[in-house]
Amino acid sequence: MKRRLLEDQKILDELNVTPLLDLAWTLLVVFVISVTAAVQGIKVNLPKASAAASPVKPSTKAITITRDGQIFLDSFPVSMQELETRLSQYKAADPNLPVVIKGDEDVYYKRVIEVLDLLGKLEITQLGLVTQKLVK
């Protein structure tokens, strides 16, 4: 009788890891979504405009000009020569390459004109200037 009681009270020596794996996958998905949403590029103070901007296409390249005149293509710093090289490569792949310029409101106008001249030289005609909506 004692032997039978011991057999009924056998200690479980296995651990069920399925709930732990479910938790790990859930945490991984939440982390990936939150990190992806947090990355938005270079922060600049955009000038205000009264009209709302149209939605940006996924293939659109963004040129950002910071207050100190530094130029970024998407979120990578580039010189004017690098900008010309990369944009010409993108233009060869997509003849209707859309480009938006995000210039800080305190940037020197000359720097924006240099970028606009470069876009004209490369015959990039799909161009937009990013602004913030004017709050009245």
Image: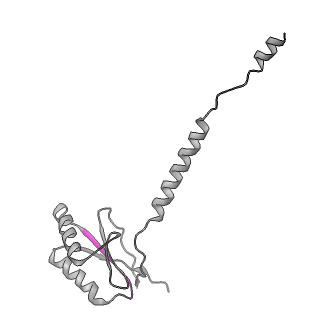
Which of the 4 image quarters holds residue 48? bottom left
Residue 91 vertical position relative to residue 79 in the rendered view, above or below: above
Quick check: is 132 in the magenta stretch? no
Indicate the colouring scheme. one colour
In the visual, does 46 lie left or right of 82? right
- Residue 120 lies, in percent from the top left, at 17, 78
- Residue 26 lies, in percent from the top left, at 55, 47
In the visual, does 118 lie left or right of 1? left
Residue drawn at (20%, 76%) of the image: 81
Find the magenta span and give its range: 98-106
Front-lying residue, 31 or 134: 31
Residue drawn at (17%, 69%) of the image: 88
Residue drawn at (32%, 84%) of the image: 69
Q: How many marks?
A: 0
Front-lying residue, 96 or 33: 33
Residue 125 visible in the current orientation: no
Which of the 4 image quarters holds residue 132? bottom left
Which of the 4 image quarters holds residue 44? bottom left
In the visual, does 43 lie left or right of 61? right
Front-lying residue, 12 or 33: 12
Residue found farthest to the top: 1
Quick check: is 102 in the magenta stretch? yes
Quadrant of the drawing holding the N terminus: top right
- Residue 49 lies, in percent from the top left, at 40, 84
Q: Main secondary structure of the magenta part?
A: strand
Residue drawn at (76%, 15%) of the image: 7
Residue 43 vertical position relative to residue 24 in the rendered view, above or below: below
Residue found farthest to the right: 1
- Residue 92 lies, in percent from the top left, at 16, 63
Residue 83 visible in the current orientation: yes
